[in-house]
Amino acid sequence: MKPAPEEQDHAVDVGFYHLTRTPLEEALPALLGRTLDAGERAVVRCPDAAAVMALDAALWACRDPVWLPHGTAKSSHAARQPIWLTEGEDVPNEARFLFRVDGAGSDEFASFTRVFDLFDGGNPQSVQRARQRWVAMKSSGHNLVYWKQEERGWKKAG
């Protein structure tokens, strides 16, 4: 049953990003770079602390874009960070863009205008969980778009 309008989050634009060509650590920097270019801030929700540490290292090492300023719970000045990596629900930088790694975190999107749901196309369990999230978000009234990774960039496929 669909929630009553007063119980429902506002409709949010949710993009499902099906990683088929590169791993998350290679695909995410370009999306975050575009976010910063648009003047937005981002929160990246990871499934666990190990994923936060891996993404932290990957963002410091990425070459394109050259600079992705970001922080984690181990950093200082959380409110100033344009990109915040977390395994929790915290949004200390008042980001309006949420990046979910394999559906990490809750489905509470009230404070966000855009959600990016990135999942590993090479992992059948990850793909199945993404399908389940798609169905749940569709029934919640969110605006959904499916993006599939192509040889160069992303192709809107649904």
Image: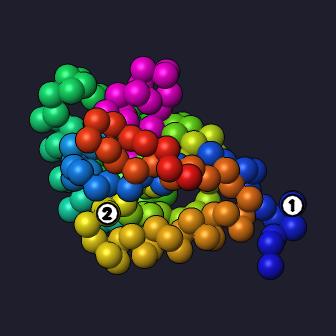
In the rendered image, the quadrant that contains the N terminus is bottom right
Residue 78 visible to an observer of this rendering:
no
Q: Is residue 128 above or below residue 23?
A: below
The answer for how far apart the CA atoms under marks 2 and 1 are is 34 Å
Residue 12 visible to an observer of this rendering:
yes
Query: Which portion, as a residue range, is magenta?
Result: 29-45
Circle 1 packing at 10 Å, graded few (<14), some (14-19), many (20+), is few
Q: Amino acid at mark 2?
A: Gly
In the rendering, at what x and y percent does residue 143 appear? 67, 50
Q: Amino acid at mark 1?
A: Pro
Residue at the disc numbered 1: 5
Residue at the disc numbered 2: 121
Give me the residue at 72% from left, 64% from top: 140
Give me the residue at 24% from left, 59% from top: 51
Asked whether residue 129 is drawn in magenta, I would say no
Q: Earlier in the sequence, mark 2 or mark 1?
A: 1
